[in-house]
Amino acid sequence: MPQAALSYNALEARLITGRVTGSEDKNFSVHVGNTFYDAAPAAGCLLEPAVNDIVLLARLENGANVILSVLFRDDTAPARLNLPADSAVHCPGRLALRAADSLNLESGRCMNLTSKDMDVAADKATASITRVNTLFDTAEFCCRALTSFGQNALSVFHSFTQCLGRSQRMVEGADETRCAESTLIASENATVMSKNNLTMAKDTSRTDARLIQLG
C-alpha cells in the first residue's frame, strides 16, 4: 500500500475544471482562470491527461492538487491508459478488443497466451522469429497453398505420415536422404530420370520383375 494511503487523513476538496497546458514526468500544469496549478493524476485516473485536455481538478485543503478525470478531449488526439504498477484486467464474461485500423501487442520481456481453445483468422500473416520451440500433442494443418522459405531447416519426428493428392519436389543443389531402411511403393508407375544414374549396394543389388527391358 502506498505511503500516502497509510498516512491518509480525511481532507476536504474543492472541485474545479481546468485545461492542461503542460506536463513534466508525472506532473501536469493545469490552467484555471488566471492561475496555474501543478497537479498529479489520481490513481483512478486511468486515461493519462494530455495538453489541451479539460480535466476535473480536486484542490485539497493541504495544498495538493489532484486530477480526478479527463472530461473533454479533442477527438483526433491519441489516448493512453496508464495503469499503476502490476495490473490485471478481469472480466467474468466476454472481453473483446476491436480496432478499425491496427492493433499492436508489445512486451519488453515476455508474452504468454493461455487458452483452452484458440482460433486465428487472417488474410495474411507474417512472423519473424529468431528461435521457436513448438510442442503439439496433435497438430492439423489445412492449406490450399503452402510456401516455405528457409536457409536452414531441421525437422525431427518420431513418426511422420504425409497424405498428398499430388506432390512435386524441386531441389536446385545436391539432395541426400539417409535412413536405416527405405521403401518406395507406387501403385501404378514409377519413373527415375537423370542424365547419369549410379546405383550402389554394399552387399546385394537385386531387380525383381516379370519383364526387364534394357535399352
Image (cartoon, rainbow, N blue to C red):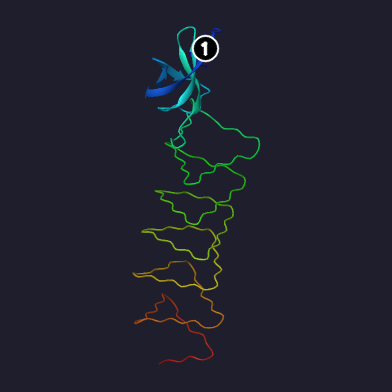
Residue at x-position 51% and y-position 91%: 211
Do we see residue 24 in this rendering? Answer: no
Residue at x-position 43% and y-position 23%: 19
- Inspect the image, locate mark 1, and give the three-letter code of the amino acid beneath it: Arg
**Relative depth, front residue between 46 and 116:** 46
Q: Quadrant of residue 139?
A: bottom right
Secondary structure state at the residue bearing disc 1: strand
Determine the residue located farthest toward the right in the rendered image.
93
Name above or below for residue 9 compared with residue 118.
Answer: above
Q: Residue 16's spot in the image, x, y percent?
A: 50, 16
Circle 1 packing at 10 Å, graded few (<14), some (14-19), many (20+), is few
Q: Residue 212's spot in the image, x, y percent?
A: 48, 90
Name above or below for residue 118 compared with residue 80.
Answer: below
Q: Quadrant of residue 199?
A: bottom left
Determine the residue located farthest toward the front in the rendered image.
33
- Quarter of the image with the C terminus is bottom left
Side (left or right) of 39 relative to 172:
right
Do we see residue 91 in this rendering? Answer: yes
Q: Residue 38's spot in the image, x, y percent?
A: 40, 16
**Relative depth, front residue between 90 and 32:** 32
Q: Residue 26's spot in the image, x, y percent?
A: 41, 22
Residue that label 1 marks: 14
Name above or below for residue 162 compared with residue 103.
Answer: below
Residue at x-position 62% and y-position 34%: 91
**Relative depth, front residue between 139 and 9:** 9
In this rendering, the count of numbered labels is: 1
